[in-house]
Image (cartoon, rainbow, N blue to C red):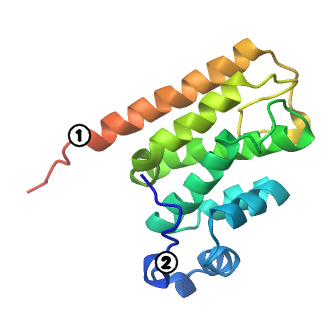
Amino acid sequence: MIDEHAIPTIAEWGDYEADLDTKWTFDKFNQKNFAEAAALFASCASATCEDLGYMPLKPFQYYMTAITRYISSEGFKNTLDLFTDDAIYFFFCRVVDMLGNKPDFILPIWHDVDAALTKIAAMKPQKFCADCDDEPENYDLVGLAELQDDLLNVRLAYDNAKQANAQPSQQHT
């Protein structure tokens, strides 16, 4: 479990200056606490979720946990509107991306991620499409059943990533 008071250290950011995107993300997030990270997400979910993808392990886990706990909180709306729809879209895309590309980053914090997904499932969606190739303005109107299917697919991706990570690596001689 991530301690909200254990803000990632500069050492945990690693050689952040070696990559321009990681440097940008470091400059934006360094020394931010949970509330400040949630405020970044609330002001621009798309940029915040994109930034998460450029973080090293410990900063990613800390700031993704901050966002998932914000989504799970009373401060996050219980119905979808333009902001929450976009926020969920970008959050979904980041979760799917990390499960596919960096499962070792997201699996240890899955409890918090799943709590956010559970809250999303309880929302009363007006529109939502978890197809990460679409832009938010191209969403189709869908019902709760389709949202539930999308969440089931993310949870299946989680199960696959967890199973793949549990496989012992094969050594070639």
Q: Mark 2 or mark 1, which has the lower sequence index?
A: 2
Q: Could you say which quadrant of the image residue 134 lies in?
A: top right
Q: Is residue 173 left or right of residue 88?
A: left
Residue 40 lies, with reference to residue 134, above or below; the image says below
**Residue at the (39%, 52%) spot, across then down:** 104
Which numbered disc covers residue 13?
2
Label 1: element kind: loop
Residue 105 at x, y percent in the picture: 44, 55
- Whether residue 135 is visible to the viewer of this picture, yes or no, is no
Residue 69 at x, y percent in the picture: 61, 47
Compute the Cα span from label 2 to label 1: 28 Å
Which numbered disc covers residue 167?
1
Residue 127 lies, with reference to residue 81, above or below; the image says above
Residue 39 lies, with reference to residue 73, above or below; the image says below
Quadrant housing the C terminus:
bottom left
Q: Are marks 2 and 1 in contact (CB under 8 Å)?
A: no
Q: Report the residue that reaches farthest toward the top.
A: 145
Label 2: element kind: helix
Q: Is residue 54 left or right of residue 140?
A: left
Residue 154 at x, y percent in the picture: 55, 31
